[in-house]
Image (tube, rainbow, N blue to C red):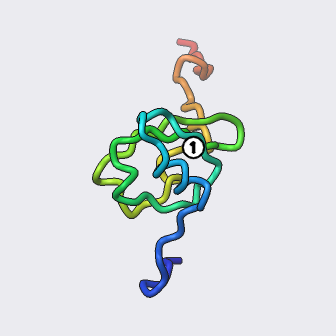
Amino acid sequence: MVRAKWKAPFVDYHLLDDILANKTRSVIKTNSRSSVILQSFVGLVVEVYTGRTYNNVYIEEKMVGHKLGEFSFTRKLGKIHDKKNKKTKSTKK
């Protein structure tokens, strides 16, 4: 579902305060995965919480308008079955 155009983009106040007060360009930790990336975030490194660890996300120009959670995955990719582990049927001749 898309947020209505007449509403402003959602940004957590604590995150916005940290971004605006950040003059040294240090890493900012946040749990707010639903916050929208604004133009003022470009060039910063934000650590986004996945539920277990923090993932570093470098904010680029093309990310503006997306949410922070889109760039910090919470699930691992499943293992692909190896052909080495499959037992092959031996044919007797």
Residue in the picture at 71% in, 37% down: 52
Point out residue 47 in the picture as x, y percentages from the top left corner.
Answer: 55, 39
28 in relation to 18, above or below: above
Label 1: which secondary element: strand
Using the image as rendered, state which of residue 4 and residue 13 is in the foreground: 13
Residue 74, position as x, y percentages in the image: 62, 44
Instruction: Quickly name the residue at label 1.
Output: 48
**Foreground residue, 1 or 67?**
67
Q: Quadrant of residue 86?
A: top right
Residue lying at the far top of the rendered structure: 93
Depth check, front residue: 90 or 38: 38
Q: Residue at x 47, y 33 (%)?
A: 26
Q: How many marks?
A: 1
Task: Tell me where residue 46 appears, x and y as whole percent.
Answer: 49, 41
> Residue 48: x and y, percent?
57, 43
Residue at the (59%, 16%) spot, across then down: 90
- Residue 88 drawn above or below residue 33: above
Work out which residue is located at the far right of the displayed protein and give it: 52
Q: Residue furthest left?
A: 61
Frontmost residue, 91 versus 31: 31
Q: Amino acid at mark 1?
A: Val
Asked where in the image residue 54 lies, by quadrant, the reply is top right
Classify 53 as above or below 68. above
Choose top left, top right, bottom left or bottom right for residue 77.
top right
Q: Which residue is painted at 53% across and 12% down in the image?
A: 93
How many residues crowd around disc 1 within 10 Å: few (fewer than 14), some, or many (20 or more)?
A: many
